[in-house]
């Protein structure tokens, strides 16, 4: 499926499977991964997973992103989100402290 690109802030982008992709050289990279790597000052490690707090895959503001060390840790967070219709204090604390382990 061919996706039409667009230019935003002088950067070539496209939307594919609800994610925003950015053209870097000859490669396309997901925008949320670039934002996270810039925030943490390193490349993502194999297995690390980025979660969009508002579930909008187009909102790649660093305030909307949360990094998990593994898919298992990410899935555990989703289970909490499903189990509780509101954020518990523990979940709020986990979100607030999301940069401390990096």
Image: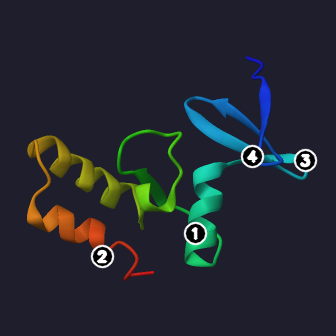
Q: How is the image coloured?
A: rainbow
64 in relation to 90, above or below: above
Q: In the image, what residue occupies the spot 58% across and 53% down?
A: 32
Q: Which residue is mark 3?
A: 26
Which of discs 2 and 1 lies nearer the camera? The answer is 2
Residue 58, how many percent across, how many down? 53, 39
Q: In the image, what residue occupies the spot 61% across and 68% down?
A: 37
69 in relation to 18, above or below: below
Side (left or right) of 37 relative to 29: left
Residue 62, how many percent across, how many down? 50, 61
Query: Gap in Å between the C-alphas at discs 3 and 1?
Result: 22 Å
User: What label sits on residue 45 in the rendered view?
Assistant: 1
The C terminus: image quadrant: bottom left
Task: Indicate which disc, 4 or 1, sits on the residue closer to the N terminus.
Answer: 4
SS label for mark 1: loop
44 in relation to 84, above or below: below
Task: Indicate which disc, 4 or 2, sits on the residue closer to the N terminus.
Answer: 4
Q: Which residue is mark 4?
A: 22
- Can residue 15 be seen in this snapshot? yes
Q: Which residue is mark 2?
A: 97
Query: Gap in Å between the C-alphas at discs 2 and 1?
Result: 20 Å
Q: Quarter-wise, where is residue 3 in the image?
A: top right
Q: Are marks 2 and 1 in contact (CB under 8 Å)?
A: no
Residue 6, how many percent across, how many down? 78, 32
Q: In the image, what residue occupies the spot 10% across and 42% down?
A: 85
Query: Gap in Å between the C-alphas at discs 2 and 3?
Result: 36 Å
Task: Indicate which disc, 3 or 1, sits on the residue closer to the N terminus.
Answer: 3
């Amino acid at each position: 499926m061919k996706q039409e690109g667009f230019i935003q802030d002088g950067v070539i982008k496209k939307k594919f499977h609800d994610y925003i992709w950015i053209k870097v050289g000859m490669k396309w990279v997901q925008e949320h991964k670039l934002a996270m790597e810039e925030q943490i000052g390193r490349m993502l490690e194999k297995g690390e997973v980025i979660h969009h707090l508002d579930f909008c895959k187009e909102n790649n503001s660093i305030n909307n992103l949360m990094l998990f060390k593994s898919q298992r840790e990410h899935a555990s967070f989703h289970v909490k989100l499903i189990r509780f219709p509101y954020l518990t204090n523990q979940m709020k604390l986990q979100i607030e402290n999301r940069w401390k382990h990096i």
